[in-house]
Amino acid sequence: MSHPPASVELSTAISAVSRASLATSSVFRSIPSSLTKEDKSPVTLGDFAAQAVVNSVLHAHFSQDKIVAEEEASALKENGELRGKVTALVKEALQRDEAGLTGQKDFKPQWTEKAASDEAVMESIDLGSYSGGSSGRFWTLDPIDGTKGFLRGGQYAVCLALVESGKPTLAVMACPNLPFTKDVPKPQEGDRSGVDGGGSLFVAVKGGGAWQRSLNLSAASASFQPISMRPRDASLTFCESVEAGHSSQGTNAEIAKLLTITAPPVRMDSQAKYASVARGDGDVYLRLPTGKGEYQEKIWDHASGQLLCEEAGGKVTDCSGKDLDFGQGRTLKLNKGVVVAHRDAHEEVLKAVQEALEKEGRGYLARGEPAPAL
Ligand SMILES: Nc1ncnc2c1ncn2[C@@H]1O[C@H](COP(=O)(O)OS(=O)(=O)O)[C@@H](OP(=O)(O)O)[C@H]1O
Ligand SMILES: [Mg+2]
Ligand SMILES: [Mg+2]
Ligand SMILES: [Mg+2]
């Protein structure tokens, strides 16, 4: 098959994510500033605009569908200047010609002029407040995953997935700073001039494979090509977070020793890590809990990446070997950590993960048990 299996959901998601990444790319080029949220993490104009764009496109086509998305509009309610800038970005992104932007000649985006007013933009952002759960279907969106990377001028991703009965079934991820192949060097951190070919767009459909094409339709690689994880090889390479606070890098180093891996890990922001291993740039993505594992991973940080890797021949579990459960609300509250590897290598990698956790006195994470009380 030379194209992912077609559906209105897929066309809508491609349109929404491509439009959102126009808005994020425009903010990226301008050296974005940020606000700090209650949890001390950053949010930018780009996060708000991308969430408004995706939610309004989804809502126009599937008005019954709920959305679990990261951002909320409250910060914009008190800041008219910021709100105006967000609305202008949303308007520009929504007005782009569909065929020119995504090549989907038969798909007609259904949003109306009203979607680009200040009020509608804030309403669209807050459509993302659904609490999630295990029944029916909903979308989950990370409008900018890797906001810290986005601010530093590194990798970031616009990540959208459809979740049905607690499982991702469709994923669309834009990585505007990730070249289409790893043979083209990634831009230096802080380089805001963009990637030749406009970065990469990834798509996965449950049971229908994983695919990528260039985000820019005028690039040579503008049609979808299937991707797959690298088969189990003699030497594995790791991919991990840039931020040490998001994943236990000390434990990863011990696991590398156990697996006799000598190559240094590739550090990258955002779900571009999942996309990179899905297309075979690296082999293993580890995101191990820090400390006692109190942090609950958010579903939008993993849903599209999980499906991309599984459809590319990978296996994704937590560090006790359980599947990720996207039906538990807005977080993966039944899971601790994430271990991604080719399905033929996963057992061996998981064993090393569990051995390293035991050695550190954190074996309860490997057994899926709560931390012992002191
Ligand atoms: N303490 C802690 N532990 C684990 N994860 C956390 C933590 N704090 C934040 N986050 C989430 O990490 C998301 C970014 O992950 P990355 O892998 O891109 O991190 S990194 O910045 O590249 O290192 C980031 O997603 P975005 O907010 O969308 O950027 C957060 O949801
Ligand atoms: Mg995120
Ligand atoms: Mg985000
Ligand atoms: Mg964030």
Image (tube, grey):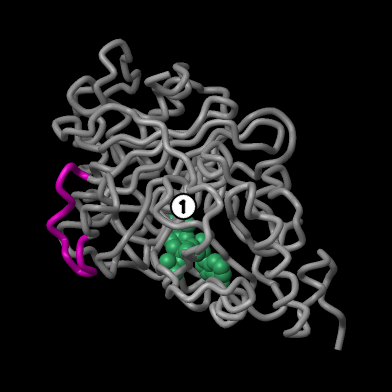
Residue type beneath disc 1: Val
Residue 169 vertical placement versus 109 (above, below): below
Q: Position of residue 216 (x, y in %)?
A: 20, 36
At x 16% / y 57%, what residue is drawn?
29
Give the quarter of the figure containing the C terminus: bottom right
Closer to us: 274 or 144: 274
| Residue 225 in picture, x, y percent from top left | 35, 30
| Quarter of the render that holds ligand 3 | bottom left
**Residue 250 appears in which quarter of the rendering?**
bottom right
Secondary structure at badge 1 equals helix
Q: Main secondary structure of the magenta part?
A: loop
Front one among 249 and 352: 352
- Considering only vertical position in the picture, is 132 above or below 285? above
User: Residue at the location (46% across, 68% down)?
Assistant: 241
Q: Is residue 82 visible?
A: yes
Report whether 91 appears left or right of 321: left
> Which of the image's four quarters has the N terminus?
top left
Residue at the spot of label 1: 277
Residue 96 placement (x, y as % from top left) = 19, 28
Residue 130 point in image, percent of width and height:
60, 42
Q: Looking at this rendering, what residue extends furthest in the front direction?
A: 234
Q: Is residue 193 magenta?
A: yes
Spot the residue most to the bottom.
374
- For the point 45% across and 54% down, the residue is 271
Is residue 120 something that shows in the picture? no
* Mark 1 crowdedness (10 Å alpha carbons): few <14, some 14-19, many ≥20: many
Residues rendered magenta in the picture: 187-198
